């Protein structure tokens, strides 16, 4: 169901080595996911494997370059993502603030920039 005048936002879920560990008995991520599903604003999301499992590609002067592993060396990594459809940025901030990783990492919110084909 598409909401009238709504916009899609991607939540990029970051972790880093300085963040506190999530306790084994913390089920808040399951509760958060169930709530956004119940509200009908979830458009998908999942965890991501380690950057060491990534493949980076680029094409320069018509030549394809493929590199295994991370292309950037940083202490942060994107651990997952969620796509939400909300009325405005204020709403998505309020919802993202309830996400488990707002307490154990950080969340970058990016509005979609739709292609108008």
Image: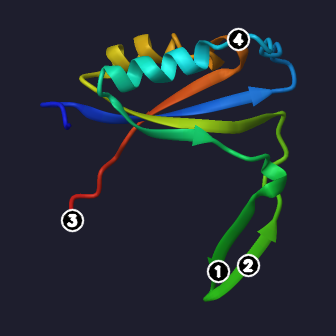
Measured Cα–Cα span from mark 2 to mark 4? 41 Å
Does dot 1 land on a helix, a strand or a loop?
A: strand
**Residue appearing at x 19%, y 37% in the figure:** 2
Measured Cα–Cα span from mark 3 to mark 2? 29 Å
97 sits left or right of 116 in the view: right
Mark number displayed over residue 60: 1
The residue lying toward the viewer, choosing from 51 and 60, is 51
The residue lying toward the viewer, choosing from 27 and 7, is 27
26 sits left or right of 43 in the view: right
Does dot 2 land on a helix, a strand or a loop?
A: strand
Name the residue beneath numbered marker 2.
65
Measured Cα–Cα span from mark 4 to mark 1? 46 Å
* Tag 4 near tag 3, CB within 8 Å: no
Mark number displayed over residue 117: 3
* Tag 4 near tag 1, CB within 8 Å: no
How crowded pointer 4 is (Cα within 10 Å; few <14, some 14-19, many 20+) is rated as few
The residue lying toward the viewer, choosing from 96 and 58, is 96
Name the residue beneath numbered marker 4.
26
Any part of residue 70 in sight: no
* Tag 1 near tag 2, CB within 8 Å: yes
Q: Closer to the observer: label 4 or label 3? A: 4
Which label's residue is closer to the chain start, 1 or 2?
A: 1
Measured Cα–Cα span from mark 1 to mark 2? 8 Å
How crowded pointer 1 is (Cα within 10 Å; few <14, some 14-19, many 20+) is rated as few
Q: Closer to the observer: label 3 or label 1? A: 3
Q: Closer to the observer: label 4 or label 1? A: 4
Does dot 4 land on a helix, a strand or a loop?
A: loop
**Residue appearing at x 27%, y 34% in the figure:** 7
């Amino acid at each position: 169901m598409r909401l009238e005048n709504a916009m899609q936002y991607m939540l990029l879920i970051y972790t880093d080595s300085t963040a506190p560990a999530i306790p084994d008995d913390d089920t808040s991520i399951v509760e958060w996911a169930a709530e956004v599903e119940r509200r009908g604003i979830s458009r998908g999301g999942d965890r991501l494997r380690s950057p060491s499992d990534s493949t980076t590609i680029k094409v320069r002067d018509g030549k394809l370059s493929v590199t295994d592993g991370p292309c950037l060396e940083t202490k942060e990594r994107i651990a997952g993502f969620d796509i939400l459809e909300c009325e405005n940025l204020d709403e998505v901030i309020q919802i993202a603030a309830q996400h488990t990783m707002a307490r154990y990492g950080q969340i970058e919110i990016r509005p979609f920039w739709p292609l108008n084909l």
